[in-house]
Protein backbone atom coordinates (compact mmCIF):
# COMPACT_ATOMS: atom_id res chain seq x y z
CA UNK A 1 0.00 0.00 0.00
CA UNK A 2 2.94 2.29 -0.47
CA UNK A 3 1.22 4.46 -3.06
CA UNK A 4 -1.80 4.97 -0.88
CA UNK A 5 0.46 5.78 2.01
CA UNK A 6 2.43 8.33 0.02
CA UNK A 7 -0.76 9.63 -1.57
CA UNK A 8 -2.42 10.23 1.74
CA UNK A 9 0.74 11.56 3.27
CA UNK A 10 -0.35 15.15 2.84
CA UNK A 11 -3.69 14.44 4.52
CA UNK A 12 -2.07 12.58 7.34
CA UNK A 13 0.84 15.00 7.76
CA UNK A 14 -1.52 17.91 8.07
CA UNK A 15 -3.65 16.03 10.53
CA UNK A 16 -0.88 14.57 12.64
CA UNK A 17 1.06 17.80 12.72
CA UNK A 18 -1.92 19.56 14.19
CA UNK A 19 -2.55 16.66 16.57
CA UNK A 20 1.06 16.85 17.69
CA UNK A 21 0.85 20.62 18.08
CA UNK A 22 -2.14 20.27 20.39
CA UNK A 23 -1.17 17.08 22.19
CA UNK A 24 2.43 16.91 23.12
CA UNK A 25 1.76 15.59 26.54
CA UNK A 26 -1.30 17.45 27.48
CA UNK A 27 -4.08 16.85 29.89
CA UNK A 28 -7.24 15.62 28.17
CA UNK A 29 -9.65 18.15 29.60
CA UNK A 30 -12.78 19.64 28.05
CA UNK A 31 -10.81 22.33 26.19
CA UNK A 32 -8.40 19.77 24.72
CA UNK A 33 -11.31 17.59 23.61
CA UNK A 34 -12.97 20.52 21.91
CA UNK A 35 -9.75 21.48 20.13
CA UNK A 36 -9.22 17.95 18.93
CA UNK A 37 -12.78 17.68 17.68
CA UNK A 38 -12.35 20.90 15.73
CA UNK A 39 -9.21 19.79 14.01
CA UNK A 40 -10.73 16.45 13.06
CA UNK A 41 -13.69 18.27 11.55
CA UNK A 42 -11.28 20.56 9.71
CA UNK A 43 -9.72 17.39 8.30
CA UNK A 44 -13.17 16.56 6.82
CA UNK A 45 -13.83 13.56 9.05
CA UNK A 46 -17.24 14.92 9.93
CA UNK A 47 -18.72 15.64 13.37
CA UNK A 48 -19.93 12.10 14.06
CA UNK A 49 -16.60 10.39 13.52
CA UNK A 50 -14.75 13.25 15.26
CA UNK A 51 -16.89 12.74 18.33
CA UNK A 52 -16.27 9.00 18.31
CA UNK A 53 -12.52 9.66 18.37
CA UNK A 54 -12.75 11.96 21.36
CA UNK A 55 -15.24 9.69 23.16
CA UNK A 56 -12.90 6.78 22.73
CA UNK A 57 -10.02 8.78 24.21
CA UNK A 58 -12.07 10.29 27.01
CA UNK A 59 -13.45 6.90 28.07
CA UNK A 60 -10.39 6.07 30.09
CA UNK A 61 -8.08 9.05 29.70
CA UNK A 62 -10.25 11.98 30.73
CA UNK A 63 -8.32 14.49 32.87
CA UNK A 64 -5.16 12.45 32.39
CA UNK A 65 -2.12 13.26 30.30
CA UNK A 66 -2.27 11.96 26.74
CA UNK A 67 0.42 11.87 24.10
CA UNK A 68 0.00 12.59 20.41
CA UNK A 69 0.72 8.90 19.76
CA UNK A 70 -2.29 7.92 21.85
CA UNK A 71 -4.42 10.39 19.94
CA UNK A 72 -3.25 9.01 16.60
CA UNK A 73 -3.92 5.46 17.76
CA UNK A 74 -7.45 6.41 18.79
CA UNK A 75 -7.91 8.11 15.41
CA UNK A 76 -6.71 5.07 13.46
CA UNK A 77 -8.82 2.70 15.55
CA UNK A 78 -11.94 4.82 15.10
CA UNK A 79 -11.51 5.17 11.34
CA UNK A 80 -10.91 1.44 11.00
CA UNK A 81 -13.93 0.60 13.14
CA UNK A 82 -16.11 3.02 11.16
CA UNK A 83 -15.05 1.78 7.74
CA UNK A 84 -14.45 -1.94 8.33
CA UNK A 85 -18.17 -2.84 8.09
CA UNK A 86 -18.34 -0.82 4.85
CA UNK A 87 -15.30 -2.45 3.24
CA UNK A 88 -16.71 -3.92 0.03
CA UNK A 89 -14.17 -4.81 -2.67
CA UNK A 90 -15.94 -5.41 -5.99
CA UNK A 91 -16.70 -9.01 -6.80
CA UNK A 92 -18.32 -9.93 -10.08
CA UNK A 93 -17.92 -13.68 -9.70
CA UNK A 94 -21.37 -14.59 -8.46
CA UNK A 95 -23.68 -11.86 -9.74
CA UNK A 96 -26.40 -12.11 -12.38
CA UNK A 97 -25.38 -12.38 -16.04
CA UNK A 98 -25.08 -9.89 -17.49
CA UNK A 99 -24.45 -7.86 -14.37
CA UNK A 100 -25.47 -4.29 -15.15
CA UNK A 101 -23.56 -1.52 -13.45
CA UNK A 102 -24.30 2.20 -13.58
CA UNK A 103 -21.61 4.76 -12.78
CA UNK A 104 -22.82 8.09 -11.42
CA UNK A 105 -21.01 11.20 -10.21
CA UNK A 106 -20.22 14.79 -11.09
CA UNK A 107 -18.30 15.44 -14.33
CA UNK A 108 -14.59 15.33 -13.65
CA UNK A 109 -14.91 13.12 -10.60
CA UNK A 110 -13.13 10.24 -12.32
CA UNK A 111 -16.17 8.19 -13.36
CA UNK A 112 -14.92 7.20 -16.80
CA UNK A 113 -11.42 6.48 -15.55
CA UNK A 114 -12.79 4.26 -12.77
CA UNK A 115 -15.07 2.46 -15.22
CA UNK A 116 -12.06 1.88 -17.48
CA UNK A 117 -9.89 0.54 -14.69
CA UNK A 118 -12.65 -1.85 -13.59
CA UNK A 119 -13.15 -2.95 -17.20
CA UNK A 120 -9.46 -3.78 -17.46
CA UNK A 121 -9.58 -5.88 -14.30
CA UNK A 122 -12.65 -7.70 -15.59
CA UNK A 123 -11.29 -8.49 -19.06
CA UNK A 124 -8.04 -9.72 -17.52
CA UNK A 125 -10.10 -12.07 -15.39
CA UNK A 126 -11.72 -13.38 -18.58
CA UNK A 127 -15.05 -11.60 -18.10
CA UNK A 128 -16.78 -10.52 -21.28
CA UNK A 129 -17.36 -6.83 -20.60
CA UNK A 130 -19.32 -4.21 -22.52
CA UNK A 131 -18.72 -0.48 -21.98
CA UNK A 132 -21.45 2.06 -22.64
CA UNK A 133 -20.62 5.70 -23.40
CA UNK A 134 -23.72 7.01 -21.67
CA UNK A 135 -22.67 10.65 -21.39
CA UNK A 136 -23.98 11.32 -24.87
CA UNK A 137 -23.67 15.08 -24.53
CA UNK A 138 -19.92 15.41 -24.34
CA UNK A 139 -17.83 14.32 -27.30
CA UNK A 140 -14.79 14.11 -25.02
CA UNK A 141 -16.61 11.75 -22.66
CA UNK A 142 -17.58 9.41 -25.50
CA UNK A 143 -14.03 9.52 -26.83
CA UNK A 144 -12.63 8.73 -23.39
CA UNK A 145 -14.78 5.65 -22.96
CA UNK A 146 -13.56 4.49 -26.39
CA UNK A 147 -9.94 4.97 -25.34
CA UNK A 148 -10.55 2.96 -22.17
CA UNK A 149 -12.34 0.27 -24.18
CA UNK A 150 -9.23 -0.15 -26.29
CA UNK A 151 -6.96 -0.21 -23.27
CA UNK A 152 -9.13 -2.75 -21.51
CA UNK A 153 -9.85 -4.82 -24.60
CA UNK A 154 -13.60 -4.35 -24.24
CA UNK A 155 -16.12 -3.27 -26.92
CA UNK A 156 -17.89 0.07 -26.52
CA UNK A 157 -21.53 0.94 -27.29
CA UNK A 158 -21.85 4.55 -28.35
CA UNK A 159 -23.99 6.85 -30.42
CA UNK A 160 -23.76 10.25 -32.02
CA UNK A 161 -23.54 13.30 -29.76
CA UNK A 162 -26.89 14.36 -28.37
CA UNK A 163 -28.46 10.91 -28.74
CA UNK A 164 -30.82 9.62 -26.07
CA UNK A 165 -28.77 7.99 -23.28
CA UNK A 166 -31.61 5.70 -22.20
CA UNK A 167 -32.06 4.39 -25.74
CA UNK A 168 -28.33 3.71 -25.91
CA UNK A 169 -28.42 1.87 -22.58
CA UNK A 170 -31.38 -0.22 -23.80
CA UNK A 171 -29.54 -1.26 -26.95
CA UNK A 172 -26.39 -2.03 -24.98
CA UNK A 173 -28.19 -4.26 -22.49
CA UNK A 174 -30.03 -6.07 -25.31
CA UNK A 175 -26.73 -6.70 -27.03
CA UNK A 176 -25.17 -7.94 -23.79
CA UNK A 177 -28.06 -10.36 -23.19
CA UNK A 178 -27.99 -11.58 -26.77
CA UNK A 179 -24.22 -11.99 -27.04
CA UNK A 180 -23.54 -13.51 -23.62
CA UNK A 181 -21.71 -10.68 -21.93
CA UNK A 182 -20.86 -11.06 -18.24
CA UNK A 183 -20.81 -7.40 -17.24
CA UNK A 184 -22.14 -4.12 -18.67
CA UNK A 185 -20.52 -0.93 -17.37
CA UNK A 186 -22.60 2.17 -18.13
CA UNK A 187 -21.10 5.66 -17.92
CA UNK A 188 -23.58 8.49 -17.28
CA UNK A 189 -23.61 12.26 -17.54
CA UNK A 190 -22.89 14.19 -14.34
CA UNK A 191 -24.31 17.65 -14.75
CA UNK A 192 -25.23 18.63 -11.23
CA UNK A 193 -26.16 22.17 -12.27
CA UNK A 194 -29.48 20.90 -13.57
CA UNK A 195 -30.44 18.52 -10.84
CA UNK A 196 -33.91 17.68 -12.10
CA UNK A 197 -32.61 16.97 -15.60
CA UNK A 198 -29.96 14.72 -14.12
CA UNK A 199 -32.50 12.86 -12.01
CA UNK A 200 -34.85 12.48 -14.96
CA UNK A 201 -32.09 11.10 -17.12
CA UNK A 202 -30.89 8.60 -14.51
CA UNK A 203 -34.43 7.48 -13.77
CA UNK A 204 -35.16 7.07 -17.46
CA UNK A 205 -32.06 4.91 -17.95
CA UNK A 206 -33.15 2.73 -15.03
CA UNK A 207 -36.74 2.49 -16.26
CA UNK A 208 -35.68 1.50 -19.74
CA UNK A 209 -33.13 -1.17 -18.79
CA UNK A 210 -35.69 -2.68 -16.39
CA UNK A 211 -37.77 -3.55 -19.41
CA UNK A 212 -35.01 -6.00 -20.28
CA UNK A 213 -34.09 -7.11 -16.76
CA UNK A 214 -36.36 -6.11 -13.93
CA UNK A 215 -33.59 -6.55 -11.35
CA UNK A 216 -31.30 -4.05 -13.14
CA UNK A 217 -29.25 -2.03 -12.47
CA UNK A 218 -27.53 -4.49 -10.15
CA UNK A 219 -25.14 -1.86 -8.89
CA UNK A 220 -25.09 1.94 -8.94
CA UNK A 221 -21.57 3.06 -8.15
CA UNK A 222 -21.08 6.64 -7.02
CA UNK A 223 -17.69 8.08 -7.94
CA UNK A 224 -16.48 10.96 -5.80
CA UNK A 225 -13.40 13.13 -6.27
CA UNK A 226 -11.25 12.88 -3.16
CA UNK A 227 -9.85 16.38 -3.60
CA UNK A 228 -13.14 18.20 -3.02
CA UNK A 229 -13.14 17.51 0.71
CA UNK A 230 -16.40 17.97 2.57
CA UNK A 231 -18.15 19.01 -0.67
CA UNK A 232 -18.27 15.29 -1.35
CA UNK A 233 -21.08 15.11 1.21
CA UNK A 234 -23.45 17.35 -0.75
CA UNK A 235 -22.53 15.61 -4.00
CA UNK A 236 -23.33 12.26 -2.44
CA UNK A 237 -26.62 13.64 -1.17
CA UNK A 238 -27.62 14.79 -4.66
CA UNK A 239 -26.84 11.44 -6.28
CA UNK A 240 -28.49 9.46 -3.50
CA UNK A 241 -31.63 11.45 -4.26
CA UNK A 242 -31.34 10.91 -8.00
CA UNK A 243 -30.56 7.19 -7.98
CA UNK A 244 -30.28 4.14 -5.75
CA UNK A 245 -26.58 4.31 -5.08
CA UNK A 246 -25.26 0.95 -3.86
CA UNK A 247 -21.60 1.73 -3.30
CA UNK A 248 -18.79 4.22 -3.49
CA UNK A 249 -15.42 4.75 -5.15
CA UNK A 250 -13.29 7.72 -4.11
CA UNK A 251 -10.71 8.87 -6.65
CA UNK A 252 -7.58 11.01 -6.62
CA UNK A 253 -6.40 9.91 -3.20
CA UNK A 254 -2.88 10.11 -4.58
CA UNK A 255 -1.57 13.42 -3.40
CA UNK A 256 -4.76 14.86 -1.93
CA UNK A 257 -4.95 16.69 1.34
CA UNK A 258 -8.59 15.72 1.81
CA UNK A 259 -8.72 11.96 2.40
CA UNK A 260 -10.81 12.43 5.54
CA UNK A 261 -13.94 13.06 3.46
CA UNK A 262 -14.16 9.36 2.62
CA UNK A 263 -14.76 8.64 6.30
CA UNK A 264 -17.49 11.26 6.51
CA UNK A 265 -19.40 10.25 3.37
CA UNK A 266 -19.25 6.49 3.96
CA UNK A 267 -20.18 6.92 7.62
CA UNK A 268 -22.99 9.37 7.14
CA UNK A 269 -24.76 7.48 4.35
CA UNK A 270 -23.55 4.01 5.39
CA UNK A 271 -22.31 3.45 1.85
CA UNK A 272 -20.16 0.42 1.07
CA UNK A 273 -16.72 1.49 -0.19
CA UNK A 274 -15.55 -0.55 -3.16
CA UNK A 275 -12.24 0.96 -4.12
CA UNK A 276 -10.05 4.02 -4.14
CA UNK A 277 -8.34 5.69 -7.08
CA UNK A 278 -4.66 6.42 -6.60
CA UNK A 279 -3.65 7.60 -10.07
CA UNK A 280 -4.67 7.88 -13.71
CA UNK A 281 -3.21 4.56 -14.88
CA UNK A 282 -4.93 1.27 -15.57
CA UNK A 283 -3.65 -0.32 -12.35
CA UNK A 284 -4.33 2.67 -10.13
CA UNK A 285 -7.52 1.40 -8.52
CA UNK A 286 -7.15 -0.34 -5.18
CA UNK A 287 -9.76 -2.57 -3.58
CA UNK A 288 -10.77 -0.76 -0.43
CA UNK A 289 -8.97 -1.89 2.73
CA UNK A 290 -10.26 -0.12 5.84
CA UNK A 291 -7.26 -0.93 7.99
CA UNK A 292 -4.68 0.22 5.44
CA UNK A 293 -6.67 3.38 4.78
CA UNK A 294 -7.03 4.16 8.49
CA UNK A 295 -3.31 3.73 9.03
CA UNK A 296 -2.34 5.80 6.01
CA UNK A 297 -4.64 8.62 7.06
CA UNK A 298 -3.65 8.78 10.69
CA UNK A 299 0.09 8.70 9.97
P1 LIG B 1 -15.52 11.92 -15.36
O1 LIG B 1 -15.86 13.23 -16.00
O2 LIG B 1 -16.20 11.75 -14.05
O3 LIG B 1 -15.73 10.74 -16.23
O4 LIG B 1 -13.97 11.99 -14.97
P2 LIG B 1 -12.71 11.40 -15.73
O5 LIG B 1 -12.67 9.92 -15.60
O6 LIG B 1 -12.66 11.98 -17.08
O7 LIG B 1 -11.53 11.98 -14.84
C1 LIG B 1 -11.24 13.36 -14.73
C2 LIG B 1 -9.75 13.54 -14.60
O8 LIG B 1 -9.31 12.99 -13.37
C3 LIG B 1 -8.95 12.85 -15.69
O9 LIG B 1 -7.87 13.67 -16.04
C4 LIG B 1 -8.44 11.57 -15.01
O10 LIG B 1 -7.25 11.10 -15.56
C5 LIG B 1 -8.26 12.06 -13.58
N1 LIG B 1 -8.34 10.97 -12.58
C6 LIG B 1 -9.32 10.05 -12.44
N2 LIG B 1 -9.07 9.25 -11.38
C7 LIG B 1 -7.91 9.66 -10.83
C8 LIG B 1 -7.12 9.24 -9.70
O11 LIG B 1 -7.43 8.31 -8.94
N3 LIG B 1 -5.97 9.96 -9.46
C9 LIG B 1 -5.60 11.01 -10.25
N4 LIG B 1 -4.47 11.64 -9.93
N5 LIG B 1 -6.31 11.42 -11.30
C10 LIG B 1 -7.45 10.77 -11.60
Image: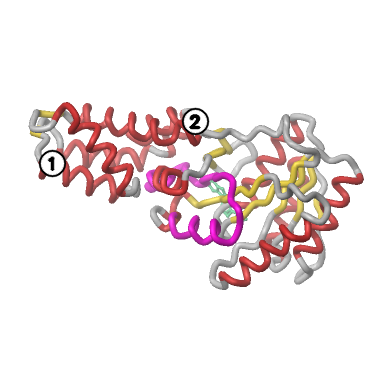
Q: Is residue 128 left or right of residue 282?
A: right
Magenta residues, start to end: 233-262
Q: Position of residue 55 (x, y in %)?
A: 23, 36
Query: How many marks overall?
Result: 2
In the picture, the quarter occupied by the C terminus is top left
Which residue sits at x=37%, y=29%? 295
Numbered tag placed on residue 32 in the rendering: 1
Q: Is residue 235 left or right of residue 49?
A: right
Q: Are marks 1 and 2 in contact (CB under 8 Å)?
A: no
Q: Is residue 199 left or right of residue 208?
A: left
Which residue sits at x=79%, y=46%? 130
The residue carrying mark 2 is 289
Q: Is residue 45 left or right of residue 183?
A: left
Evaluate whether residue 107 shows in this view: yes
Between disc 1 and disc 2, whose residue precedes? 1
Q: Is residue 232 magenta?
A: no
Amino acid sequence: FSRLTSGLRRSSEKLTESVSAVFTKRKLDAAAIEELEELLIAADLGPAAAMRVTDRLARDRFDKDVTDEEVKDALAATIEETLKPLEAPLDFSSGPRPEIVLFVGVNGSGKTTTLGKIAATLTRAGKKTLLVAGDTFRAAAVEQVSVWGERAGAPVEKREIGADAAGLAYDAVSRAQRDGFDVVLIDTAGRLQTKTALMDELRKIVRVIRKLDETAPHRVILVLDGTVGANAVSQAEAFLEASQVTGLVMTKLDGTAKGGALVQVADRFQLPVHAIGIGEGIDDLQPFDARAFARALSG
